[in-house]
Amino acid sequence: MPGVGWPRNGIPGTPSPRSSRRRITTRSPRGRRTDMHGTTDIILLTVAGLSLLAILSTYVLYPIVMAVAARMSRTPRKRDETLLPDVTMVVAAYNEIAVIEEKVRNFLAIDYPAEKLFLVVGSDGSSDGTNEVLERFADGERIRWFDFGRGGKISTLNNVMKHVHTPFVIFSDANTMYDADAVRKLMRHFADERIGGVCGNLLLRPSTESVGSTGESTYWSYENLLKRWEGEAASVLGATGGIYAIRRELIHEMPVRGQLADDLLVPFGALTGGKRFLYDSEAIAREDTEDSMQQEFRRKIRVALGTFNTIPDLRPMLRQLPASLRIMFFMHKTLRWLVPFFLLLIPLALLPLYEHQWVRCAVLYPTLLFTIIGLVGWIAESLGRRLGPFSLPFYFLAINLALIIAWAKLAFRYRPTATWDRPART
């Protein structure tokens, strides 16, 4: 028969056993193995790509969207520079002997009618002489203070608010010093009934020439710019703890169960009340950064723990907000809290692919370089040196390491206590 050979087994048209074995080997096992590797590579690249997208979304894409939205916003701004309502400044203090006198004198120097501006300080069982300084300045009317014993910041704020009866409240910290016109700048926005609160512009002054202090100041400037765009486009989602004002009727008693982020809970009271929360870059307050990155690092862990501990209280509040604000919260807050996991996922997901040069050049080498820069910044911090180009990478890695530690503590059922301790201020 034409085209049909006579193989050794003598059956025409039947492949030889050797030919059959060779065909199975090349088509079946090898083909399946290649397909499996291809699918795995796609999955790993997808995980790494989505992780990178999440990081870029919260740090780059979201600010760009907010900047454009703020520029396109046509919401009219109603401000009254002559509006001077009664307002009370509230401070929770614990062992603030190093700054409490300066704070009271700074309050007295604020350019605002004396009969309309009041100060109430709640001492959280201070034992370093803070109470004695407060007693010296207290007059029972304009300046008052109370020692509620050791209960923590949230408990102290709840107790202080029972003694506040003005229509507006300013929350501040003992180490936050206001510019003379800061209160006037905050109050002018309340001429608009749609405004529930206003966050001021906290400027951080590096207390030392350290890399950590410089990095924090730079990072804080970025956050302030983002707050401004959020406020112009829609609403600020969290306040600056040292300077923000809010309508008294929008303040609710906070739960006392460990440390909580009061500068998230209080502003959310305004948002759930159907009001907007603004940012005013002209309402300026100043605050020194921590003396060392070690102190700042411990503070970051404590703040992160307090924030994560607040999440159960924020969930029902978030459900009351418009979809646009929920998306903003996810992009700005939720993704930011998860960034350290994304940073770990990228190199780990691509680990099996490092045999490819393009993966090494695109991921491995930049990751190593960024880490080395951060380590150089840490060494410079340890030696008390200031290296400008290394400050931001070092600070970025430090805050994400603090987040990882905070998440790990929560995973092991650690719960922050209601009371807080701080290193002595200098």
Image (tube, rainbow, N blue to C red):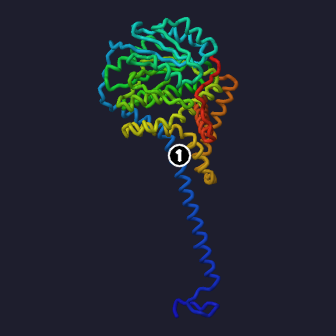
Q: Residue furthest right?
A: 383
Q: Nearer the viewer, residue 135 or 40?
A: 135
Residue 175 in sight here? no
Q: From the viewer's perspective, is residue 101 above or below residue 392?
A: above
Return the x and y of residue 85 as percentages of the image width and height.
36, 14
Label 1 sits on a secondary structure element that is: helix
Which quarter of the rendering shows the C terminus?
Answer: top right
Name the quadrant containing residue 124.
top right
Q: From the viewer's perspective, is residue 253 above or below residue 308?
A: above
Please give left or right for residue 77 compared with residue 8 in the image.
left
Residue drawn at (39%, 24%), measured in percent from left and top?
A: 197
Return the x and y of residue 38 as percentages of the image width and height.
56, 61
Please give left or right for residue 211 compared with residue 142 in the image.
right
Crowd rating for badge 1 (residues with CA inside 10 Å; few <14, some 14–19, many 20+): many
Amino acid bearing label 1 = Ser
Residue drawn at (48%, 27%), measured in percent from left and top?
A: 263
Name the quadrant containing residue 231.
top left
Q: Which residue does the numbered mark 1 point to in the structure image? A: 51
Return the x and y of residue 65 as percentages of the image width and height.
40, 36
Residue 401 in sight here? yes
How many marks on residues? Answer: 1
Name the quadrant containing residue 343.
top right
Return the x and y of residue 342 as percentages of the image width and height.
55, 43
Residue drawn at (59%, 26%), measured in percent from left and top?
A: 419
Q: Nearer the viewer, residue 247 or 390?
A: 247
